[in-house]
Image: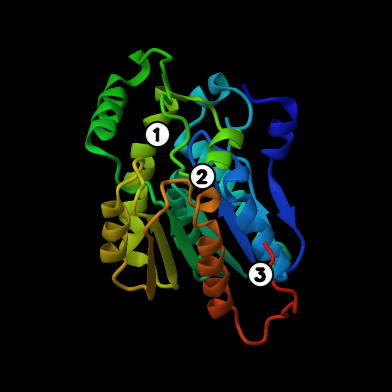
Amino acid sequence: MTDASELRAAGAIRRDGAAPAVVLVHGFTGTPWELGTLAEALSAAGYAVEAPLLPGHGETPLALSRATWDGWLAHVERSVDEVLARHGSAVVIGFSLGSLLALVAGVARQHRGVIALGALGTALELPTLDARVLRISEAMGRFLPNVNVPKFRGSDVRDPMAKRSNPAYATQPLRAAREILRGQREARAVLGSIAVPLLVVHGRADDTTPLAASLALVSAAERAEVELRVLPRSAHLLGRDVEHREVCDAVLGFVRRVTPASAPRDSRSASGL
């Protein structure tokens, strides 16, 4: 079970710093903990960081079962708008479900301060069996009972410490999981409109979202300048897995490349993280 200290550690993350601020959006059943190492690396490099806790997360599976795509998206949009109001520019990066939210919210604001986007382990596609179950669940509408599917193998991560310490839920409520399909449809609808630099990172050992999802994203984002990184040893939980340093380096390098030359910079380094 998740204890109180883990829940406190799983809350939203905010770090003061320079623009562009980086908004990090976590995945389904997870928390900002998934992106905590990345948040600290960006903060140590001088960037402002915002990692919101999505509705229904960090509480109980029952709370998540009541959550919807619209609620998640509205929460992310508010976070991005608040960051833009404070800092003027932002890079929006999402993990798994969070990648869909980052893409939809970010594309709508790419001419209003969002200067780049990132998708880590994108959930644009799911394994065939998972997708079939969610389609059936979606078709059942309000008649779907409140079913929680256990994560029999735990977190999809190769690092044993990360697997033990992850404060994510141990089950997945189908009522909320089927909302991922709505997110996939809305994300696919905007991919051709991405006009800012896009970073795409995927783990080759990912059993939760197929590498094909990231390749489809790269192919569809035909107007964007895309950087694709495939990590050979990582599973799904990229920000905490065996190549988390490589993820931090890839994201930090990307953010530095898209940061305007006139933006304030911090001389500190994230190399020690």
Q: Name which residue type carries label 1.
A: Glu
> Mark 1 falls on what kind of element?
helix
- In the image, 129 versus 155, the foreground residue is 155
Instruction: Specify which label sits upstream in the sequence, 1 or 2.
Output: 2
Residue 244 in view, yes or no? yes
Horizontal arrangement in the rendering, residue 83 relative to residue 61 (left or right): right
- For mark 2, does the 10 Å Cα neighbourhood hold few (<14), some (14 to 19), or many (20 or more) residues? some
Label 1 close to label 2 by CB (< 8 Å): no
**Vertical comparison of 59 with 165: above or below:** above
Residue ID for mark 1:
179
Residue ID for mark 3:
271
> Mark 2 falls on what kind of element?
loop
Q: Mark 1 or 2, which is nearer the eye?
A: 2
- Residue at 30 percent across and 47 percent down: it is 210
Q: CA distance from mark 1 to mark 3?
A: 38 Å
Q: Name which residue type carries label 2.
A: Asp
Residue 241: where, in percent of width, then height?
51, 49
Residue ID for mark 2:
159
